[in-house]
Image: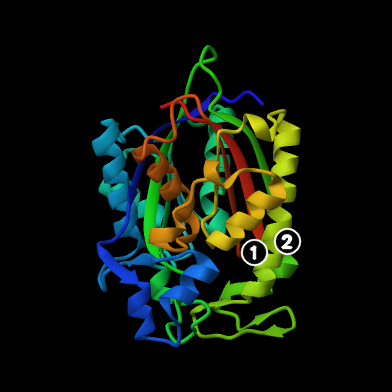
Amino acid sequence: MHSMARITAIGTYVPDRVLANSDLEAMVDTSDEWIVRRTGIRERRVAGEDEYTSDLCIKAVENLTARYHKDLTDVDFIVVCTVTPDYRFPGTACRIQERFGIRRAGAVDLNATCAGFVYGLHMANALIASGMHRKVLVVAGETLTKITDYTDRTTCILFGDGAGAVLVESGTHEQESGFLGFYLNSKGEGGKHVYCSGLSQKMGDLRLTATGKIVQNGREVYKWAVTAVPEGIRTLTGDSGWPLDKVDWLIPHSANLRMIESICEKSGFPMERTLYSVEHFGNTSSASIPLALDLGLKEGRVKTGDILLLYGFGGGLVEAGALVRWVL
């Protein structure tokens, strides 16, 4: 796969408020030791009462422009990946377009849950490969704490809020490809294992827990992820011609540190070359991969020319992997 699309800037944002495991001990029957042992999470960030997904996304894009001095007025497509938009409509992408004075751009929200960011990259690459677009802004943002049931000790310990943004631009034929391969898959019959109810209170013949909050069968999601993700990684590396031993960093969705450890073990990839954001930010769904990538950059671990394997997976059930050459 030869793609002229390249990631040319990144920005992230998390809210100021910290929800530590000790805070959760006062809310439900749990403990710091139990949460860390089961999930690897020590704290997560929580959006303010009047702070919503568009606010987090805007601050992530502001961080991107401040760090890379990018002009966004000529962006020609905006993709916002989220399951927690401010409104049913208008879309969050339109809020981004207005805030940054982008003159002429398509704007769409994309819901692929925790795989959303990689789906957004796939879409950006395809738009640029088609020749119809040259500069795509991909933003992933979530305020999951607003749809978390804080009486459910099995789920309320997991979720946090945050956002990440990247600019994807068309390069030249002389430049190295920024995207080396993609793999996407779905398993709709597993949708009942993690959902948030909406207009319908049924999924097929299943009567849903219609609270408008996240409902998850963690055991079933875990079983699926630790089998499907290693299989997807093998398919992605095999089809792309980039063997796993040529990958510098694996950046999976930060759902649960124990899940990541199992995925690495079954994939034969070392944990010490795996980046994650779950320890201090919790599960931030679509935002978890850009948050982990940016942590790797700020810590000096990810360097120009590194090959990254990004892999998102979550509700749907959906999964998406991308092999990326880091060119910044």
Q: Where does the image place residue 114, in percent across and percent down from the top left?
A: 54, 58
Residue at image coords 31%, 40%? 64
Residue located farthest toward the top when viewing the structure as drawn:
174
- Pointer 1: what residue? 316
**Seen from this angle, which residue lies furthest front?**
33
Relative to residue 69, is residue 190 depicted above or below? below
**Image position, residue 35 (x, y; %):** 47, 73
Disc 1 marks a residue whose amino acid type is: Gly
Instruction: Identify the secondary structure beneath mark 2.
Output: loop
Say which quarter of the image contains residue 294: top left
* Image position of 257 (left or right of 47): right
- Residue at image x 49%, y 80%? 212
Q: Which amino acid does label 2 sit on?
A: Lys
* The C terminus, quarter of image: top left
* Residue 140 locus on image (x, y percent): 44, 52
Q: Left or right of 130: which side holds 301?
A: left
Disc 1 on helix, strand or loop? loop
Circle 2 is placed at which residue position? 187
Nearer-the-camera pick, 26 or 237: 26
Q: Earlier in the sequence, mark 2 or mark 1?
A: 2
Q: Is residue 223 left or right of residue 115?
A: right
Q: In which quarter of the image is residue 281?
A: bottom left
Q: Residue at x 64, y 50 (%)?
A: 264
Residue 303 at what x, y percent from top left? 43, 29
Query: Residue at image x 26%, y 44%?
Result: 62
Whether residue 130 is visible, yes or no, is no
Quadrant of the frame with the N terminus = top right
Color scheme of the displayed model:
rainbow
Check whether the beta carbons of the residues at disc 2 and disc 1 lie within 8 A of each other: yes
**Label annotation for residue 294:** none
Label 2 to label 1: alpha-carbon separation: 7 Å
